């Protein structure tokens, strides 16, 4: 994004030279890449993959920038990778989600929570 910001700044400077400083540019970041947060804890992804396999789904990992909710939650301190909900044809008039896929993602979420809960329980027992 730094490159794009510099391009915009350069365009504004050229236009301001031509049109007597009539343009103000104020760039504010509002949508960050959650990968920076998620990479800090590699066990998050490994445990998620294990949880997905536990409910008999083959993980399909496709790096994406992420949704705004997950991104904001990640930058608020809770790493939140996108898992999907079984949807198809996103952001089109043909967008849909199958009930069976929603049930399966629910099973995955339960498996993830169970995995982290058991780990925390074992940590407390050791202490």
Image: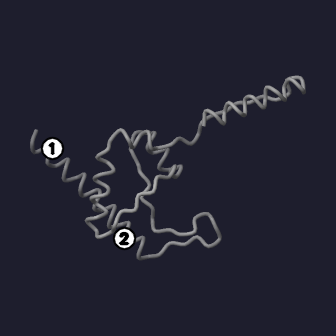
Q: Secondary structure at mark 2?
A: helix
* Image location (x, y in percent) of residue 80: 41, 49
Residue 112 lies, in percent from the top left, at 29, 57
Residue at point 61%, 33% (across, down): 2
In-image side of 64 versus 78 (left or right): right
Q: Nearer the viewer, residue 31 or 49?
A: 49
Q: Residues within 10 Å of mark 2 (few under 14, many from 20)?
A: some
Residue beneath disc 2: 104
Residue located 57% across and 65% down the image: 90
Q: Secondary structure at mark 1?
A: helix
Residue 89: image quadrant is: bottom right
Residue located farthest toward the right when viewing the structure as drawn: 19
Residue 49, numbered circle: none
**Quadrant location of residue 8?**
top right
Q: Is residue 27 left or right of residue 67?
A: right
Name the foreground residue: 27 vs 39.
39
Cα gap from disc 1 to disc 2, whole angstroms: 29 Å
> Pointer 1: what residue?
123
Tell me what residue is drawn at x 78 percent, y 28 percent.
24
Q: Dot 1 surroundings within 10 Å: few (below 14), some, or many (20 or more)? A: few
């Amino acid at each position: 994004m730094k490159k794009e910001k510099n391009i915009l700044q350069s365009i504004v400077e050229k236009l301001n030279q031509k049109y007597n400083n009539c343009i103000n540019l104020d760039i504010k970041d509002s949508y960050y890449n959650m990968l920076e947060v998620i990479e800090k804890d590699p066990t998050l992804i490994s445990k998620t993959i294990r949880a997905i396999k536990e409910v008999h789904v083959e993980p399909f990992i496709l790096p994406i920038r992420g949704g705004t909710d997950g991104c904001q939650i990640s930058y608020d301190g809770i790493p939140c990778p996108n898992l999907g909900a079984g949807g198809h044809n996103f952001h089109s008039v043909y967008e849909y989600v199958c009930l069976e896929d929603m049930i399966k993602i629910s099973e995955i979420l339960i498996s993830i929570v169970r995995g982290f809960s058991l780990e925390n329980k074992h940590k407390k027992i050791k202490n």
